[in-house]
Image (cartoon, rainbow, N blue to C red):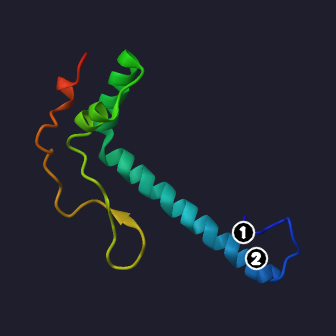
């Protein structure tokens, strides 16, 4: 995975193996974070799926309305480089209503 096959290898097989292991660990960690986000916001995903089945296309404003209760996740400030759920969930921005007010829903 961490190898460049277009030119000769200028590091040992041990180093290549360690690179592969680290890349695999990063991918696995990202997969777990994605699973956590999807699980935490399943209701919002159901709302957007329902609107998309009905309308097929939505604009940015409609997406904001549907995801009104989903706070932006933050990078961990402790240096891990990972993301985490916000410590202080945000309130819906003024003018952004609940998903039920999206036209056609």
Residue pointed to by mark 2 = 16
Q: Which type of secondary structure does the marked residue at label 2 adopt?
A: helix
Q: Position of residue 14 (x, y in %)?
A: 77, 82
The image quarter containing residue 99 is top left
State the residue at coordinates (62%, 73%): 22
Q: Earlier in the sequence, mark 2 or mark 1?
A: 1
Question: CA separation, marks 2 and 1?
Answer: 7 Å
> Does 98 sit above or below residue 38?
above
Which is more toward the observer, 17 or 76?
A: 76
Quadrant where the image shows the C terminus: top left
Q: Position of residue 58 (x, y in %)?
A: 36, 26
Within-10-Å neighbours for mark 1: few <14, some 14–19, many 20+: some
State the residue at coordinates (33%, 79%): 78
Residue pointed to by mark 1 = 2
Q: Are marks 2 and 1 in contact (CB under 8 Å)?
A: yes
Quadrant where the image shows the N terminus: bottom right
Residue farthest left in this picture: 94
Which is more toward the observer, 87 or 102?
A: 102
Which is more toward the observer, 62 or 77?
A: 62
């Amino acid at each position: 995975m961490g190898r460049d096959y277009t030119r000769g290898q200028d590091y040992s097989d041990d180093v290549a193996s360690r690179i592969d292991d680290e890349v695999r660990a990063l991918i696995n960690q990202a997969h777990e974070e994605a699973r956590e986000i999807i699980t935490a916001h399943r209701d919002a995903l159901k709302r957007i799926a329902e609107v998309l089945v009905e309308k097929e296309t939505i604009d940015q404003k409609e997406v904001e309305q549907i995801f009104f209760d989903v706070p932006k996740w933050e990078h961990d400030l402790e240096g891990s480089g990972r993301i985490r759920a916000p410590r202080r969930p945000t309130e819906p921005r003024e003018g952004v209503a609940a998903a039920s007010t999206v036209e056609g829903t």
